[in-house]
Image (tube, helix red, strand yellow):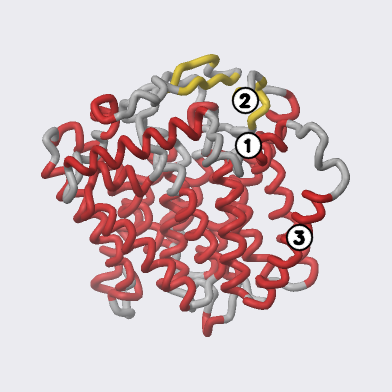
Amino acid sequence: MRALCRRPSLAAAATVLLTCLPAGRQEVSSGVQVTAADLASLLLVALAATVVLASRPTHPLPASAVVPARALVLAPVAGAAGIAMLASPDVLTSLPGYVRCLQVFVLVPLAVLVTVRDRTDTLVVGGALVGAAALQGLVGCVQAVTGTGASYAGERVRAVGTFGALDVMGMASVVSYGALLLLAAGLAWRGGRRAAALGGAALLCVPLALSLSRGAWLALLGASLVMLFVHSRALAARVILLGAAAATVLVLGPGAGSDPDLLGRRLASITSAVSQPDQSVSDRYSLWLTATRVWQDHPLTGAGPRRFAELRDAYAPIELSSGSDTDDPVNGFQRRPLLSPHNMYLLTLSEQGLLGLAALGACLASMAWWAVRAAVPAAAGLLAWQGIDFLYGDVGGPSTVVTSVVLGLVLSLVARPAATGWAGGAPVALGVAR
């Protein structure tokens, strides 16, 4: 407890690491599920509140040093969600959704901002993210090799880490965060440390590939290019040229006409997502259409938080499947209902209306602008990955708490660039000087 009081960022690190606990057998449910990481996030928020209250009478620095003014970017998100809840036809149903929105997009990011005060804190939280990514990646690789992962094409070869088939995107998200932080370290460091960081980032690409998550692949590619551009435009241009040349060789080289393997088929399906979508992509398009139809009937404040699942059947096109099949050794075969549009922007639009979408967009856009202006590759990359991820996914499952910690880390990097190791615009990965 003394260590937590001296270094409250340890609570943020614990929140990340507790998401790696095996979930055990889970039943598909639309109810509220509280995990150990959720409880740790409550401790994190309480510690942050203690830090703020304790600093008021005795702290020699102004209030902005404890809670930077840029934290106000979170206020519209809380306000829009509150208005949507009060305007909801079913306030009791929307109340848990409102609390969850506050937890993910306001309270936990704000708590991370308050507790990540210097380079050591940045290392603590960033190290926890990299450690969680390494653990999840190792478990995922074992699952893919031994056939103990989630089912794909009738085989249990999809790497999902400790999250299981019911949170199939969890491992890909955590591994992506770790890879981007290691890439940021590789851009900032020199010599052997640079090689180690870049090598670690490359190794994390293996379990990410084995996750068979097309969206995560595209998000990591886009985020990496953003980081390179923020770090050095010349380096970004060289990498793009080399990447284009390598892609040309792969396409025109020998063996291109051979039968692709499982990973190759998954990669090839990216280009056919529009012309010949598979069932999962087709269902996603139907869910997106459903969300826009819900919004059209509730344009300003939405239908209310957590009400998309309740209204889905009334607005969904006939092509939408009744659910998706999941299978893994722990949970067995289950039919999972499609309870969200798998697009954070459309989910916000349908449940919180234009006010909610504008608030979320303003929050993410502001942090992105600050990251680019301050030349913080780590913050720019993490935010770019999350922004792309929200195009094909939304919040849900144990990994959501990691997302909220990442948003808080990004906010701390752009709100305190000097204290967290980005003084004078010089990039310093994870708070460690070049």
Does the rendering let one see residue 3?
no
- Above or below, 78 against 362 in this view is above
**Mark 1 → mark 2, Cα distance in angstroms:** 9 Å
Which amino acid type corresponds to the residue marked 3 in the rendered image?
Ala
Locate residue 238, reporting x and y percent.
72, 71
Which residue lies most toward the top here?
333
User: Would residue 24 be found to the left or right of residue 208 on screen?
Assistant: left
Which amino acid type corresponds to the residue marked 1 in the rendered image?
Leu
User: Would residue 27 be found to the left or right of residue 90 on screen?
Assistant: right
What mark, if any, has residue 196 been given in the picture?
A: 3
The residue where tag 1 is placed is: 212
The residue where tag 2 is placed is: 152
Q: Secondary structure at mark 1?
A: loop
Q: Residue at x 31, y 63 (%)?
A: 362
Which amino acid type corresponds to the residue marked 2 in the rendered image?
Tyr
Q: Secondary structure at mark 3?
A: helix
Would you identify the image quadrant in which residue 411 lies? bottom left
Q: Secondary structure at mark 2?
A: strand
Work out whether residue 191 or residue 294 is closer to the camera in this orientation and state it. Answer: 294
Q: Residue at x 24, y 36 (%)?
A: 96
Work out whether residue 9 or residue 31 is closer to the camera in this orientation and state it. Answer: 31
Q: Earlier in the sequence, mark 3 or mark 1?
A: 3
- Above or below, 290 against 405 in this view is above
| Residues at marks 1 and 2 touching, judged by CB atoms closer than 8 Å | yes
- Circle 2 Cα neighbour tier, 10 Å, few/some/many (<14 / 14–19 / ≥20): some
Q: Residue at x 52, y 38 (%)?
A: 170
